[in-house]
Structure formats: structure tokens, C-alpha cells
Amino acid sequence: MTTIQVRIDKKTKKQAQKILNEMGLDMSTAIKLYFKQIAINKGIPFRIITENGMTLEQELAILKASEEAKKGIGISESFDSPEELIKELKKK
């Protein structure tokens, strides 16, 4: 056996501890389960998402597209109304 020390903010620890207690698990057991799953899956055993429910790559793509749109990059047409845009989209 070996020992691992982890530093984490109090709020996150309390939130996790509350959920784990409800599941009947202590922190040590939860960490052991997590490490076992990493070994079995040969990687992180779940999709890593941001607070917005997206992957980091998805968020970065949205931010990039938003910046490009503000600069007019990738915009080939303009429409006078939402209805015109919808009409054009339905053609495609």
C-alpha cells in the first residue's frame, strides 16, 4: 500500500463528502474506486465537462466562432429578418 495526499478547497470537499456519505462511501474508498476505474478504462472514466455542461473543446469552439462572427468572419450573407434566415436555412 501507498499513501496519497490531495489538496482541495473546503467547499468542494464538503460537497463531495456529503454526496459520498449519502452513498455510504468514505473519501478513501471513493478515491480508490476512481483510481481502479482509471486503470480499467486506461483513462479518465467519464467525460470531463465545464460548469456549462460542455467539454472544454466545445466551449473554446463556441468562443472562437462568436469572436469570428463579431469580426464578420465566416458570414456570407446577411438577412433583414429572422424569417428570411429561417427561409434560407430551410432551402439547405
Image: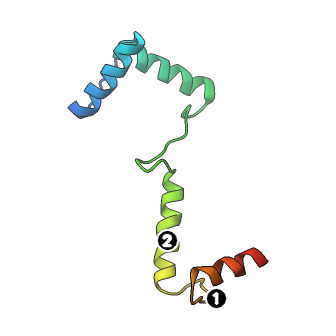
* Image coords of residue 37 (percent x, y): 55, 23
Residue under numbered circle 2: 64
Label annotation for residue 76: 1
Q: Identify residue type, mark 1.
A: Ser
Question: Which of 45/84 is in front?
Answer: 84
Question: Which of 81/67 is in front?
Answer: 81
Q: Distance of mark 2 from mark 1, alpha carbons?
A: 17 Å
Q: Find numbered disc 1 in the image and state the secondary structure of the residue it sits on.
A: loop
**Residue 63 relative to residue 74: left or right:** left
Query: From what the image shows, is residue 71 above or below residue 19?
Result: below
Label annotation for residue 44: none
Q: Identify residue type, mark 2.
A: Lys
- Can residue 2 be seen here? The reply is no
Query: From what the image shows, is residue 48 above or below residue 34?
Result: below
Q: Quadrant of residue 6?
A: top left
* Image coords of residue 9 (percent x, y): 23, 34
